[in-house]
Image: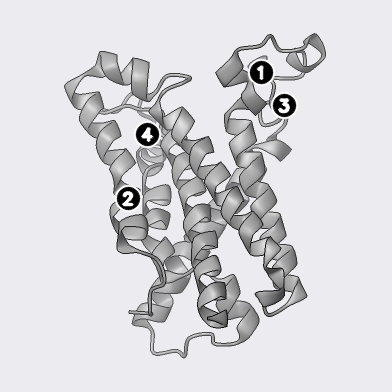
């Protein structure tokens, strides 16, 4: 196994916690689940932006110390990832509307599918397409690449840029959860089923795991930066 830089509680034990809570509460108390877990201001809805803004803060810390990164190209990439975390957190909260419950301006409401103050309900270019790119990044960079390095006899990438670019091994558990949590919904669609024996809003936990993946990805890079300088 590659050398690890992050504490085990963050990358191994913390990721399954949300899905355990979601499934346990859904089974034992559907009413509590609907109100406090899946609601507009429930656990899942609020956990995603919290994690995304945490990742944004880690990204800012990296950018403040960008001279410790090996290339300008990597700095540009990490700037894009950091801004993506800010966008994800802001959109999840409808830029504060979910918390403060203001009325959506009429000009925005006419463009927004759900009459909310956000961009992702206005066009697929702000929602489905970026989401697909992120999902592919999680699948390839978070699962396929580390498993390939782990089980293949091919030499691992050791050049500065690519070694920093690819997600660390610590991202693997969260990446698996991010992809797996959406599989029941996709099975339902492929099989033409109206309902599954167990139903939740599968896309919402996936957004949480996307945010957590970005947090662990950036945290591993930050840990490597300061380890390298120390």
Contact? badges 2 and 4 (CB < 8 Å): no
Q: Is residue 106 above or below residue 56?
A: above
Q: Determine which of the numbered discs, if any, sits on residue 122 in the image.
A: 3
Q: Which residue is tagged 2?
A: 14
Q: Which residue is tagged 1?
A: 116
Residue with the most extreme right position: 107
The local secondary structure at tag 4 comes to helix
List x then y, in percent, for residue 120.
67, 31
The local secondary structure at tag 1 comes to loop
Q: Which residue is tagged 4?
A: 188
Residue at figure coordinates x 59%, y 38% from the top left: 89
Based on the displayed image, in which of its 4 quarters is residue 39 positioned?
top left
Earlier in the chain: of badge 2 and badge 4, it is 2
Label 4 crowd (10 A; few <14 / some 14-19 / many >=20): few
| C-alpha separation, residue under disc 3 versus residue under disc 4 | 26 Å
Query: Which mark is in front, 3 or 1?
Result: 1
Question: Where is the N terminus found, in terms of image quarters?
Answer: bottom left
Which of 207/58 is in front? 58
Query: Which mark is in front, 1 or 2?
Result: 2
List x then y, in percent, for residue 99.
56, 20
| C-alpha separation, residue under disc 2 versus residue under disc 4 | 28 Å
């Amino acid at each position: 196994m590659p050398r690890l830089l992050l504490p085990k509680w963050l990358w191994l034990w913390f990721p399954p916690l949300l899905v355990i809570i979601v499934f346990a509460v859904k089974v034992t108390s559907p009413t509590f689940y609907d109100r406090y877990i899946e609601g507009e201001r429930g656990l899942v809805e609020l956990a995603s932006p919290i994690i995304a803004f945490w990742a944004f803060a880690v990204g800012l810390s990296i950018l403040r110390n960008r001279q410790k990164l090996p290339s300008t190209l990597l700095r540009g990439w990490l700037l894009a990832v950091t801004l993506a975390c800010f966008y994800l957190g802001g959109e999840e909260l409808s830029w504060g509307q979910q918390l403060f419950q203001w009325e959506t301006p009429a000009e925005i409401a006419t463009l927004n599918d759900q009459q909310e103050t956000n961009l992702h309900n206005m066009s697929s270019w702000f929602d489905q397409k970026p989401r697909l790119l992120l999902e592919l990044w999680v699948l390839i960079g978070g699962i396929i690449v580390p498993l390939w390095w782990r089980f293949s006899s091919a030499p691992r990438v050791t050049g500065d840029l690519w070694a920093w670019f690819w997600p660390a091994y610590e991202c693997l558990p969260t990446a698996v959860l991010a992809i797996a949590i959406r599989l029941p919904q996709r099975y339902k669609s492929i099989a033409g089923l109206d309902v599954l024996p167990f139903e939740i809003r599968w896309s919402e936990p996936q957004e949480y795991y996307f945010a957590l993946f970005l947090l662990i990805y950036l945290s591993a890079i930050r840990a490597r930066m300061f380890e390298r300088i120390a």
